[in-house]
Each structure stands twice: as structure tokens, then as C-alpha cells.
Image: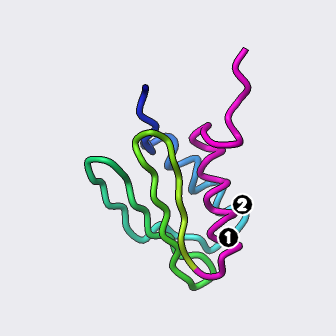
Amino acid sequence: MPTRWLTTETLVKLVKRLRERWPGAEVEKIVQKRSKQILYIRIEGRMVKLIVYRDGRVRAFGEPEGVALALRNIAERVLGVGEHRASEG
């Protein structure tokens, strides 16, 4: 199974998509671990934590919950995983 990390290219694409939705969005910190990447993102003055696992799972935590869910959906689209992955055929 190929790993689905955020690379430099996908990170740039993620930030671009975030700023389309929230113009003031900033990635504050990125933590790389063996099994996951953790991004701390400031959106509308609030901190949201985005976790990307090497198998492609994406989780997001923060307030308000709707922002965290939207962030997770955007990240899944950028990575091409989850419900948003292209149909294989």
C-alpha cells in the first residue's frame, strides 16, 4: 500500500485551497512523526489540528466543529483519499 503523505506539492495545494475558503488561514506548525503528520492551522483566529496518517486517513480537531470537518474534506480531496477519491476502473 503506497503511503499518502503531504508532500511539498500537496502541502502547497492544500494551503491554496484553504486560502480560497478562508483568506487568513495560516499553517502554524508541522510535526512529522513515523506514522503521521500533524499540522496546526490557524483559521479565523482559532487553532485546528489536522492529522494525516501514512495510510491516507485524515482526522481534524478544533472549534468550531464545522471548520474542522471542512478542513478534513479539503485535505482528503487534495490527497485523493476518503470519499473524494477518484473512481477506479
Question: Could you tell me residue 19's position as x and y percent?
Answer: 65, 63
Dot 2 falls on a residue whose secondary structure is helix
Q: Is residue 27 left or right of residue 75?
A: left
Q: What residue appears at the point 71 percent right and 60 percent down from the top-left corner? A: 20
Q: Residue 38 lies in what quarter of the image? A: bottom left
What is the C-alpha distance between the residues marked 1 and 2? 6 Å
Residue bearing mark 1: 23
Residue 20: numbered disc = 2
The amino acid type, in three-letter code, at marker 2 is Glu
Graded by Cα atoms within 10 Å as few (under 14), some (14 to 19) or many (20 or more), the crowding at tag 1 reads few
Predominant secondary structure, magenta span:
helix
The amino acid type, in three-letter code, at marker 1 is Pro
Magenta-drawn stretch contains 74: yes
Residue 82: numbered disc = none
Q: Is residue 77 left or right of residue 28?
A: right
Q: Nearer the viewer, residue 17 or 56?
A: 56
Q: Residue 32 lies in what quarter of the image? A: bottom left
